[in-house]
Image: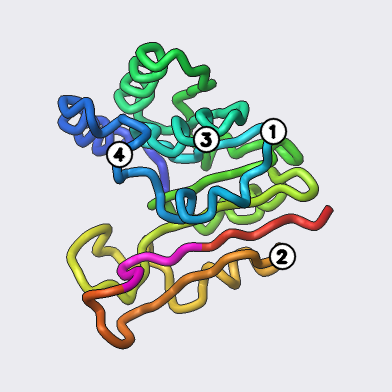
Amino acid sequence: MTEQFGDKDKWNSRYRVAGDDKSSINSSAPQVSRVLTENSHLLPEEGVALDLACGLGANALFLAKQGLTTHAWDISDVAITALQDAVRSMTLQINSEVRDVILKPPLANSFDTIVVCRFLDRRLTGSLVDALKPGGMIFYQTFSVDKMSGVGPGNPDYLLKPNELLQMFRSLVLRVYREEGLEGNVEQGFRNEVMLVAQKAR
């Protein structure tokens, strides 16, 4: 997904609607990524974390509650304002920023943990790997081309091909991977999306 001005307008419009529902930015709400909640035992006890393309910031709030120094970036100023309001009401500290991550990717060797949820721009892969400190981990979850419902983008450019996420982060050490596609009983399991946790060598 390329973050340009057209995308900024689109996401601002969506977040204005979502922001009317205050539960949508509650860190205990279902919007926290499953790749994060199901694998939170892999998070470090301390360190610097980034919620990239954070939206309303449920993942950032979750990371901050784990005691990590948390940064949250999104192209939508509406989303960042909503997150800042939520942070004030919860007495948490999150360094939130309106940022086009394609034009301004994270600096090398700057984060112990990076979380990316429902965002895909393949041009960013190298920058994400470089941004991890030695031993740092990326938690990634986004939509697959093998999805059984209409959720998520329809444009295949924004959907992962089979095993693509593995290939994108093949230079890292794999810790968790889940991609169930359309096999078996599609009413159960983890469907529509793919998740990965991978670690940079120390």
Residue closest to the eye, 12 or 83: 83
The residue that disc 1 covers is 47
Q: Where is residue 117 drawn, in percent x and y?
A: 43, 50
Give the Cα distance between marks 4 and 3.
14 Å
- Which residue type does callout 1 highlight? Gly
Give the Cα distance between marks 2 and 3.
22 Å
The residue that disc 3 covers is 63
**From this viewpoint, is residue 1 visible?**
no
The residue that disc 2 covers is 173
Question: Vertical placement of 130 versus 28: above or below?
Answer: below
Whether label 1 touches label 2, CB < 8 Å: no
- Which residue type does callout 4 highlight? Ala
Q: Earlier in the sequence, mark 4 or mark 2?
A: 4
Q: Earlier in the sequence, mark 2 or mark 3?
A: 3
Q: Which residues are magenta?
A: 189-195
Give the structural element (helix, strand or loop) at label 4.
Answer: loop
Q: Earlier in the sequence, mark 1 or mark 2?
A: 1
